[in-house]
Amino acid sequence: MRVKQGQTLHTTQTIDTIDYTVTDTSDGSQVASGSLQVADVMFDELQTTDWDDDVIGYNFRVNLSPSHFATAGKLFNVHFTFTPTAGYPMTVDVEVETNEDDE
């Protein structure tokens, strides 16, 4: 995903913190929450490695623990809060659907 404000991309120098919560949308229960190390998930330049969405690329990429999505056949909401070094926090919601069990 690209994290930007207007046309300006954010970088490791412009984002102070990144927090997330994972919620089970079927009952609204919070499954997980945490903070991410900005330097581990933000990039100062756009990346295209393992990226098929477009030719532009991304500057934020995270792999959350599979344990956050352990229940099969569920829809989860991942709510990210990006707090910049200056200005107001930005939020992004991503839906993750797990496959049904094959049992």
Image: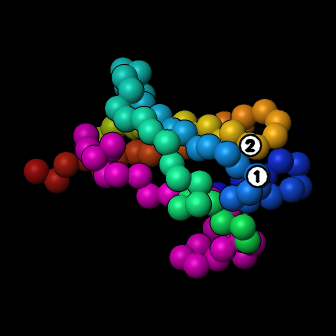
Q: Is 76 part of what is drawn in magenta?
A: no
- Residue 77 in percent (x, y) is at 48, 36
Q: Amino acid under label 2?
A: Pro
Q: How many numbered marks are there?
A: 2
Compared to residue 92, the image places residue 8 above or below, namely: below
- Residue 69 in percent (x, y) is at 32, 44
Q: Amino acid under label 1?
A: Thr
The Cα atoms of the two marked residues, 1 and 2, are separated by 6 Å
Q: Which residues are magenta?
A: 46-72
Q: Main secondary structure of the magenta part?
A: loop
- For the N terminus, the image quarter is bottom right
Residue at the image point whose x is 74% and y is 57% from the top: 13
**Numbered tag placed on residue 84 in the rendering:** 2
Compared to residue 24, the image places residue 2 above or below, namely: below
Tell whether label 2 touches label 1 (CB within 8 Å).
yes
Mark 2 Cα-neighbour bin, 10 Å: few <14, some 14–19, many ≥20: some
Asked if one can make out residue 22 in the rendered structure from this viewpoint, the answer is: no
Residue at the image point whose x is 88% and y is 48% from the top: 6
Residue 33 horizontal side relative to residue 44, left or right? left
Residue 15 horizontal side relative to residue 7, left or right? left
Residue at the disc numbered 1: 14
- Residue 19 in percent (x, y) is at 54, 39
For numbered disc 2, what is the local secondary structure?
A: strand
Mark 1 Cα-neighbour bin, 10 Å: few <14, some 14–19, many ≥20: some
Residue 77 horizontal side relative to residue 93, left or right? left
